[in-house]
Image (tube, rainbow, N blue to C red):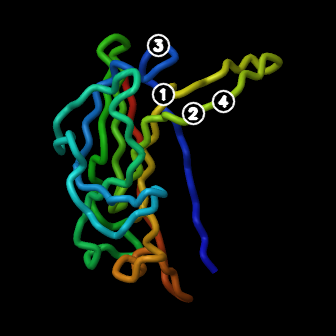
Amino acid sequence: MRLGLTFNSYFNLTDGPSIAGIQATLGTNQHQVVDDANIPTGVIESYPNITANQSFELGPKEPDIDHCFIMETDAAKIPLDTRQQSLNMLASFFHPGTKLHLEVHSTEPAFQFYTGKNIDVPAVPSEGIEARGARSGFCVEPSRYVNAVNTEKYKHMVLLKKGEKWGSRNVYRAWQD
Protein backbone atom coordinates (compact mmCIF):
# COMPACT_ATOMS: atom_id res chain seq x y z
CA MET A 1 0.00 0.00 0.00
CA ARG A 2 1.20 3.53 -0.78
CA LEU A 3 0.11 6.27 1.54
CA GLY A 4 0.63 9.95 0.84
CA LEU A 5 -0.11 12.74 3.27
CA THR A 6 -0.28 16.40 2.36
CA PHE A 7 -0.48 19.24 4.84
CA ASN A 8 -1.15 22.63 3.31
CA SER A 9 -0.84 25.43 5.82
CA TYR A 10 -0.81 28.79 4.09
CA PHE A 11 0.80 31.84 5.64
CA ASN A 12 0.60 35.55 4.94
CA LEU A 13 2.59 37.86 7.22
CA THR A 14 1.33 41.06 5.60
CA ASP A 15 -1.77 42.98 6.57
CA GLY A 16 -3.07 42.75 3.00
CA PRO A 17 -4.37 40.25 0.46
CA SER A 18 -0.93 39.43 -1.02
CA ILE A 19 2.40 38.02 0.17
CA ALA A 20 4.23 40.84 -1.67
CA GLY A 21 6.90 42.46 0.49
CA ILE A 22 7.70 39.43 2.64
CA GLN A 23 11.41 38.74 3.05
CA ALA A 24 12.11 35.00 2.59
CA THR A 25 15.23 33.02 3.44
CA LEU A 26 15.58 29.35 2.52
CA GLY A 27 18.03 27.06 4.31
CA THR A 28 19.08 25.56 0.97
CA ASN A 29 18.94 26.34 -2.72
CA GLN A 30 19.13 22.68 -3.77
CA HIS A 31 15.89 21.48 -5.32
CA GLN A 32 14.43 18.59 -7.26
CA VAL A 33 14.41 19.35 -10.97
CA VAL A 34 10.99 18.69 -12.52
CA ASP A 35 9.87 17.71 -16.00
CA ASP A 36 7.25 19.50 -18.11
CA ALA A 37 4.46 17.92 -16.00
CA ASN A 38 6.11 19.12 -12.74
CA ILE A 39 7.14 15.56 -11.79
CA PRO A 40 10.59 15.35 -10.14
CA THR A 41 13.18 13.77 -12.41
CA GLY A 42 15.45 12.52 -9.60
CA VAL A 43 18.05 15.20 -10.36
CA ILE A 44 18.99 17.65 -7.58
CA GLU A 45 20.60 20.97 -8.46
CA SER A 46 20.72 24.64 -7.44
CA TYR A 47 17.52 26.64 -7.84
CA PRO A 48 18.09 29.67 -10.11
CA ASN A 49 18.41 33.08 -8.43
CA ILE A 50 18.16 31.79 -4.84
CA THR A 51 21.17 31.62 -2.55
CA ALA A 52 20.90 29.49 0.57
CA ASN A 53 20.57 31.53 3.77
CA GLN A 54 20.25 34.84 1.91
CA SER A 55 17.07 36.87 2.00
CA PHE A 56 15.00 37.61 -1.10
CA GLU A 57 11.69 39.42 -1.48
CA LEU A 58 8.39 37.88 -2.49
CA GLY A 59 6.82 40.21 -5.03
CA PRO A 60 3.34 40.49 -6.53
CA LYS A 61 4.12 37.80 -9.16
CA GLU A 62 7.74 36.71 -8.73
CA PRO A 63 9.45 34.61 -7.75
CA ASP A 64 6.95 31.95 -8.78
CA ILE A 65 8.07 28.87 -6.84
CA ASP A 66 6.50 25.45 -6.39
CA HIS A 67 9.45 23.11 -5.80
CA CYS A 68 10.79 20.56 -3.39
CA PHE A 69 13.94 21.94 -1.76
CA ILE A 70 16.50 19.47 -0.41
CA MET A 71 18.24 19.95 2.95
CA GLU A 72 20.10 16.59 2.90
CA THR A 73 21.34 15.77 -0.60
CA ASP A 74 22.89 12.43 0.38
CA ALA A 75 19.80 10.23 0.26
CA ALA A 76 21.71 7.32 1.80
CA LYS A 77 21.91 9.29 5.08
CA ILE A 78 18.13 9.67 5.42
CA PRO A 79 16.49 7.16 7.76
CA LEU A 80 12.77 6.42 7.99
CA ASP A 81 12.64 7.86 11.50
CA THR A 82 14.34 11.26 11.78
CA ARG A 83 12.91 12.23 15.19
CA GLN A 84 16.26 11.84 16.96
CA GLN A 85 18.05 14.11 14.49
CA SER A 86 18.64 17.81 15.08
CA LEU A 87 16.08 20.29 13.85
CA ASN A 88 17.19 22.29 10.81
CA MET A 89 15.80 25.69 9.88
CA LEU A 90 14.15 25.09 6.52
CA ALA A 91 13.00 28.64 5.95
CA SER A 92 12.39 31.95 7.67
CA PHE A 93 10.18 34.88 6.75
CA PHE A 94 9.75 38.49 7.87
CA HIS A 95 7.49 41.33 6.85
CA PRO A 96 8.93 44.79 7.64
CA GLY A 97 5.51 46.48 7.81
CA THR A 98 3.82 44.11 10.24
CA LYS A 99 7.07 43.07 11.99
CA LEU A 100 5.83 39.46 11.87
CA HIS A 101 8.37 36.62 11.73
CA LEU A 102 7.92 32.94 10.86
CA GLU A 103 10.51 30.16 11.06
CA VAL A 104 9.99 26.57 9.94
CA HIS A 105 12.24 23.91 11.50
CA SER A 106 12.21 20.17 10.84
CA THR A 107 14.11 16.91 10.96
CA GLU A 108 12.74 16.12 7.49
CA PRO A 109 15.30 16.11 4.65
CA ALA A 110 13.24 18.28 2.28
CA PHE A 111 10.39 20.77 2.03
CA GLN A 112 7.98 21.98 -0.59
CA PHE A 113 7.95 25.77 -0.97
CA TYR A 114 4.99 27.20 -2.84
CA THR A 115 4.31 30.90 -3.42
CA GLY A 116 0.60 30.44 -4.07
CA LYS A 117 0.14 31.25 -7.75
CA ASN A 118 -2.88 28.96 -8.07
CA ILE A 119 -4.75 29.85 -4.87
CA ASP A 120 -8.40 30.36 -5.72
CA VAL A 121 -10.66 30.22 -2.66
CA PRO A 122 -14.16 31.60 -3.08
CA ALA A 123 -15.77 33.80 -0.48
CA VAL A 124 -18.28 32.32 1.95
CA PRO A 125 -20.15 35.44 3.09
CA SER A 126 -22.46 33.50 5.41
CA GLU A 127 -19.38 32.43 7.41
CA GLY A 128 -17.50 35.73 7.12
CA ILE A 129 -14.85 34.18 4.88
CA GLU A 130 -13.37 36.47 2.22
CA ALA A 131 -12.16 35.21 -1.14
CA ARG A 132 -8.46 34.51 -1.46
CA GLY A 133 -6.67 34.66 -4.78
CA ALA A 134 -3.27 34.10 -6.32
CA ARG A 135 -0.34 34.80 -3.96
CA SER A 136 -2.57 35.39 -0.95
CA GLY A 137 -0.39 32.94 0.98
CA PHE A 138 2.69 30.74 0.81
CA CYS A 139 3.38 27.18 2.03
CA VAL A 140 6.39 25.52 3.56
CA GLU A 141 5.73 21.79 3.87
CA PRO A 142 8.44 19.66 5.53
CA SER A 143 8.69 16.35 3.67
CA ARG A 144 10.72 13.58 2.16
CA TYR A 145 11.82 13.90 -1.43
CA VAL A 146 8.76 14.30 -3.65
CA ASN A 147 8.08 11.15 -5.70
CA ALA A 148 10.63 9.19 -3.62
CA VAL A 149 8.48 6.06 -3.72
CA ASN A 150 8.90 5.94 -7.51
CA THR A 151 12.66 6.61 -7.54
CA GLU A 152 14.73 3.56 -6.61
CA LYS A 153 17.60 5.45 -4.92
CA TYR A 154 15.14 7.43 -2.75
CA LYS A 155 12.52 4.75 -2.02
CA HIS A 156 14.12 3.66 1.29
CA MET A 157 13.19 6.97 2.95
CA VAL A 158 9.45 6.46 2.43
CA LEU A 159 8.81 2.72 2.15
CA LEU A 160 7.67 1.48 5.55
CA LYS A 161 7.86 -2.28 6.12
CA LYS A 162 6.27 -4.33 8.89
CA GLY A 163 7.93 -3.58 12.24
CA GLU A 164 9.64 -0.36 11.07
CA LYS A 165 8.92 3.10 12.45
CA TRP A 166 8.57 6.35 10.58
CA GLY A 167 8.71 9.70 12.29
CA SER A 168 9.79 13.31 12.11
CA ARG A 169 9.55 16.53 14.10
CA ASN A 170 8.35 19.89 12.75
CA VAL A 171 8.32 23.24 14.51
CA TYR A 172 6.61 26.39 13.22
CA ARG A 173 7.71 29.39 15.27
CA ALA A 174 6.10 32.83 14.87
CA TRP A 175 6.43 36.16 16.70
CA GLN A 176 6.09 39.89 16.26
CA ASP A 177 8.72 42.53 17.06
Disc 1/disc 3 C-alpha distance (Å): 13 Å
User: Which residue corresponds to mark 2?
Assistant: 119
Q: In this view, does 95 lie to the left or right of 141?
A: left
> Quick check: marks 1 and 2 in contact, CB under 8 Å?
yes
Residue visible at 45% across and 49% down in the picture: 141
Count of marks placed on residues = 4
Disc on the earlier residue, 1 or 3: 3
Rendered image quadrant of residue 31: bottom left
Image position, residue 11 (x, y; %):
48, 31
Disc 4/disc 3 C-alpha distance (Å): 18 Å
User: Which residue corresponds to mark 4?
Assistant: 121
> Quick check: marks 2 and 4 in contact, CB under 8 Å?
yes
Mark 2: few/some/many CA within 10 Å (<14, 14-19, 20+):
some
User: Which residue corresponds to mark 3?
Assistant: 15
Residue visible at 33% across and 62% down in the picture: 109
Disc 2/disc 3 C-alpha distance (Å): 18 Å
Disc on the earlier residue, 1 or 2: 2
Q: What residue type is labelled 2?
A: Ile
> Quick check: marks 1 and 3 in contact, CB under 8 Å?
no
Q: Quadrant of the C terminus?
A: top left
Give the SS element for disc 2.
loop
Mark 4: few/some/many CA within 10 Å (<14, 14-19, 20+):
few
Give the SS element for disc 1.
loop
Disc on the earlier residue, 2 or 3: 3
Residue visible at 56% across and 88% down in the picture: 162
Disc 1/disc 2 C-alpha distance (Å): 7 Å
The label number, if any, that marks residue 135 in the structure image:
1
Specify the farthest residue to the front: 36
Relative height, residue 33 to residue 78 (above, below): above
Disc on the earlier residue, 1 or 4: 4
Q: What residue type is labelled 1?
A: Arg
